[in-house]
Amino acid sequence: MDVIVVGCGASGVAALRRLHDAGLKVVGLEAADRIGGRICTVEYGEGRLDVGAAWCHGEKDNIVFELANPLDLLGRPNPDHQWFVRSNGDLVPEDQGKAIQDTLSQAVEAADKNNAKSISECVRDATISTPSLQQDPHLSASFAEWFERSNHAGGARGKSLRGLDESWGCEGEFMLNWKGRGYATVLDVMLNKHPDPTQQVPIQILLNKEVTSIKWRSQAAAAPLVHVQCRDGSLYAAKSLIVTMSVGVLKERGELVHVQCRDGSLYAAKSLIVTMSVGVLKERHAKLFNPPLPAEKVNTINNLQMCVLDKIYIEFTKPWWPKFPSSFAVLWRPEDKDKFSKEERWITEIYGFNTVEYQPNSLLAWIYGEGAVEMEKVSEDAVKAGVIKLLNVLFSKEFEVTPVKSILRSKWASNPFARGAYAYRSVTNEQHGGGAITLSEPLYFKDNFPILCFGGEATSHHRHGAVHGAIEAGFREADRLIEAFIKGIY
C-alpha cells in the first residue's frame, strides 16, 4: 500500500481521488458508518436536509463551485427578508436593525488586525465608543450579543482579529444551495458517482474503522512494534522481525507507517494523510501517534479552537412566516432570559432562525457555543418542548405560529469523530503561536519523504472552516505525495 488516508470527509475523499488517479495504491479508513464527516445529508420528510455543511460559499477560486457548477448542481437564493425580534416579542424596525448591524460590521472591518485582540473585544468596545450605538445602549448590547453569536466569535478568548486577515473569502454568491439534493452531492461528484453511478471510481474506503494507533518512522525513531499483513489478509504482530527479502523487493514494498483500528485490524503503507478534525486531535494525539507529534504541532493543535455550532430543524404543519425566504435575528434581553429555568438556559442561546430551501414548512434554528453543548445533552422531546416555548415567546405577538410537527437536531460537540463544527484561529494562537500553516506541515522520514501528512479544513492556509478549504487541503497533500513518489524520494 502506498498511502493510507485516515478520515473520509471532504478532505479525505479529495485526497483519495487525486491519489487514485495518479495510479497510487490507496485505502481510506473512516471511523463512522458513512463517509462525509461534517458533510451529513439526511432524508427528512419528502426531501433532504444538511445536518452539517449546507451551502457553497462563493464562486471565484472555490473548488466546490468549480466541481458542481458545470453539472448545474447549484441554485441561487432569492433576496432574503430579515426580521429583528426582541426576546419579548417586539419587532425592531428593519432599517434600524440593519443600521446597527452595519455599524458593528464596519467596526470589525476597520479594526487593526495586527494584534492579539478578539473579535468579541472589538464588538464590545464599539458599543461603548460609537455614539450611534449609545442612543439605545440596551438594544445595542442585545445586537452585540447576537452579532458575536452569529459570527461564532467565541468571546474574549475566541476568534482573533488577525484571523480575519488570514481567512480569505471567495467572491460571488455566498449562499449557493444544492437544489434540494444536499451537500453530500459533492462527494458523489468527487467519486464520479454523479451524474452516472455506474462510473464510480473503484477507491477502497472502509467504514467503521476507528484508528487507535499510528506508528510512524522518523530519522530519530523506528516503530517499536512490528505488524505484518499477508496478501491473504492474515495478520501477525511481534516485537521484532528478521527480513531476508532482496534489496529490490524492500525498495518496492517497504512500509513506514503502521495503523491499528479499534476492531483490531492492521494496515501498513509508505505514507499516511490524517484528516481528523482539530477537536479529535486535541483529544487523541497523545495516545494516537508513536512517536509523539513534535512540540510545534502539538502547540498548534492545543491553541486552535473548535467552533460548536448546531442546527435545529423545525417542521410545522404549514408555514406561518409571511415571506420566503426570511431570517429572524433573536435579540435577547437579560430579563427575558431569567424567565427560563436553569435546565432551559440553553434555549436562550438560540440566536436566529431562517427558512429552508426546498423545505417550505420548515425553519432552521441556530445555536452556538455552550448553549449548543447543553442542548445536545437533553432529550429530543425536551428540545422540541423548549423550541415550542421559545416560538411562543418570540412570535406570538406578531405572528400566528402553526403547530410543530417534528424537529431534527445536530450534535457536533458530542460526536466523537468531530467534536465541533470547524476550527478557527484564536487569541491563544496570537499569544502562543501556531496556525493552519504549521498544522499543515508534513513530518518527514530521513528529512525528505513526507511520511505523515495533515489535511482537513483546519489545515487550509486561507480557507479553513469551509468545505472548499477541506477539499483544497486534501488535493494539496495528495499532490505533495504524488510528487514525492514520482521523484523517487521514497
Image (spheres, rainbow, N blue to C red):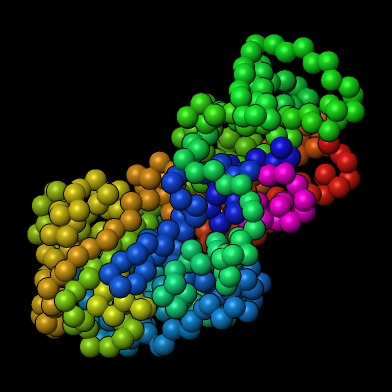
355 is higher (above) or lower (below) than 248: below
In-image side of 49 versus 14 (left or right)? left
Q: Considering depth in this image, is 299 or 5 the residue closer to the camera?
A: 5
**Residue 210 in sight from this viewpoint:** yes
Question: Residue at (63%, 68%) from the top-left corner?
Answer: 63
Q: Considering depth in this image, is 246 or 288 the residue closer to the camera?
A: 246
Question: Residue at (62%, 29%) from the top-left corner?
Answer: 233
Q: Quadrant of the C terminus?
A: top right
Q: Considering depth in this image, is 250 or 283 the residue closer to the camera?
A: 250
User: What's drawn in magenta, residue-wise?
Assistant: 14-26
In-image side of 322 versus 356 (left or right)? left
Task: Examine the image and state in which quarter residue 252 appears.
Answer: top right
Task: Measuring from the top left, give residue 104's x and y in whole percent.
Answer: 41, 73
Question: Residue at (65%, 40%) from the top-left corner?
Answer: 4
Q: Quadrant of the N terminus?
A: top right
**Residue 128 in sight from this viewpoint:** no
Task: Measuring from the top left, give residue 210's x and y in whole percent.
Answer: 49, 36
Question: Residue at (17%, 60%) from the top-left corner?
Answer: 384
In-image side of 51 versus 396 (left or right)? right
253 is higher (above) or lower (below) than 327: above
159 is higher (above) or lower (below) than 377: below
Residue 70 highlighted magenta (yes or no) = no
179 is higher (above) or lower (below) than 19: below
Task: Examine the image and state in which quarter residue 62 appears.
Answer: bottom right
Magenta stretch, overall SS? helix
